Image (cartoon, rainbow, N blue to C red):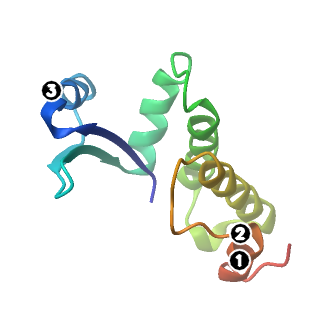
């Protein structure tokens, strides 16, 4: 699944409502830690949004480009139909996204991802 998350302190969440209204998609929720998040799920939706936003993104451009590339591959067929080359490209995109996140506890190395998909690096 592809997901884009926008986070904002709940005291200043009006911007998230605006983004949701402009894009016409997403789920807004308040977390227990005082943050609000807007989550947008779905390969086709993410690809469409990123296609429109990529020229304007400044701070997460590498992540956005990698997610767009992965979504482009994922949109084309089911996971069982992917070639090893396509799966390796998706893994490459995942690693780029992980490496550009500020914090994530669930990071997996490319080797671990290859094993999950039954591939050799």
- Spatial CA span between label 1 and label 2: 5 Å
Above-or-below relation of 110 to 94? below
Residue 21, which numbered label? Answer: none
Tell me the element at label 3.
helix
* Side of 71 relative to 108 (left or right): left
- Spatial CA span between label 3 and label 1: 39 Å
Q: Nearer the viewer, residue 93 or 99?
A: 99
Tell me the element at label 1.
helix
Q: Residue under circle 2?
A: 109
Q: Label 1: few (<14), some or many (≥20) within 10 Å? A: some
Q: Residue under circle 1?
A: 112
Above-or-below relation of 73 to 65? below
Residue 14, which numbered label? Answer: 3
Q: Nearer the viewer, residue 103 or 118?
A: 103
Q: Label 2: few (<14), some or many (≥20) within 10 Å? A: some
Q: Quadrant of the C terminus?
A: bottom right
């Amino acid at each position: 699944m592809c997901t884009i998350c926008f986070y904002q302190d709940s005291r200043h969440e009006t911007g998230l409502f605006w983004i949701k209204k402009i894009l016409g998609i997403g789920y807004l929720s308040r977390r227990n830690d005082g943050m609000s998040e807007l989550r947008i799920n779905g390969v086709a939706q993410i690809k469409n949004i990123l296609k429109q936003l990529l020229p304007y993104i400044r701070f997460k451009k590498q992540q956005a480009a990698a997610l767009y590339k992965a979504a482009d591959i994922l949109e084309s067929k089911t996971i069982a139909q992917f070639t090893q080359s396509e799966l390796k490209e998706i893994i490459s995109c995942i690693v780029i996204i992980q490496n550009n996140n500020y914090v994530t506890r669930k990071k997996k190395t490319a080797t671990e991802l290859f094993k999950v998909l039954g591939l050799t690096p």
